[in-house]
Every structure is written in structure tokens, then in C-alpha cells.
Amino acid sequence: MLVGAGLGAWLLGAFQGDTLDQAAVQDGVMQVLREDFGEGDVKNAQCPEDQPVKTGTTFECTVTVAGQPKKVTVRVLNDQAQYEVGMPR
């Protein structure tokens, strides 16, 4: 369960064909953590390549929050490449 999840739905260019654009998702994860979770010091998001734009797809990204390595879960919400980002853990 993703408690306090934010949506990264507003990002343009979040997908290329049938897969998510890795760089756009990485930028989106950092933006959601800053804007929706209030994390001021977020950098180095690393998400896996070639994730399908398919409802229910989930994957983990790593990110540095306040100098500490954290993981976040990303879940694709629909075939429009909208996704939600879980709280860093």
C-alpha cells in the first residue's frame, strides 16, 4: 500500500512508445518528493529503463534524500503514463 502517495501525472514526455521515458520519470520522482512530500534535498534519482506503460506496473527507484539513500515505489496508473510515487523509505 502506498501511503501518502503523490501523483506525477502532469509530466509531459513521460513515455516513448510503450515504455516510460527513464529520464522523465527520474525527474518526476524528484519533483513529487520535493513538492508533495516537502523533501528539500533530493537528488540522484535512478529508475530502471524500459518500464512498460501498463496499468499496475510497479518498480522501485533509488534516490538520495538529505544525503541518505532511499527507495521509492512507482506505480503506473494508466496507459497515459500517469504514475504515483510512494513515500521514501
Image (spheres, helix red, strand yellow):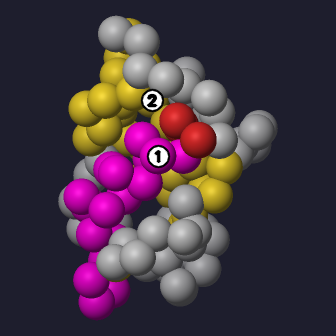
Q: Position of residue 85 (x, y in %)?
A: 57, 48
Residue 41 vertical placement versus 71 (above, below): above
Residue 86 appears in view: no
Task: Give the prevailing secondary structure in the magenta stretch.
Answer: helix
Pointer 1 or 2: first along the chain? 1
Question: Residue at coordinates 42% horizontally, 54% vertically from top-left?
Answer: 28
Q: Position of residue 32 (x, y in %)?
A: 54, 46
- Hey, which residue is sitting farthest top in the picture? 67
Residue 84 appears in view: yes
Point out the stretch of residues depicted in magenta.
16-32
Disc 1, SS: helix
Horizontal relation, residue 27 to residue 59: left or right? left
Q: Quadrant of residue 83?
A: bottom right
- Residue wearing tag 2: 71
Question: Residue at coordinates 33% horizontally, 50% vertically from top-left?
Answer: 26
Numbered label attached to residue 76: none
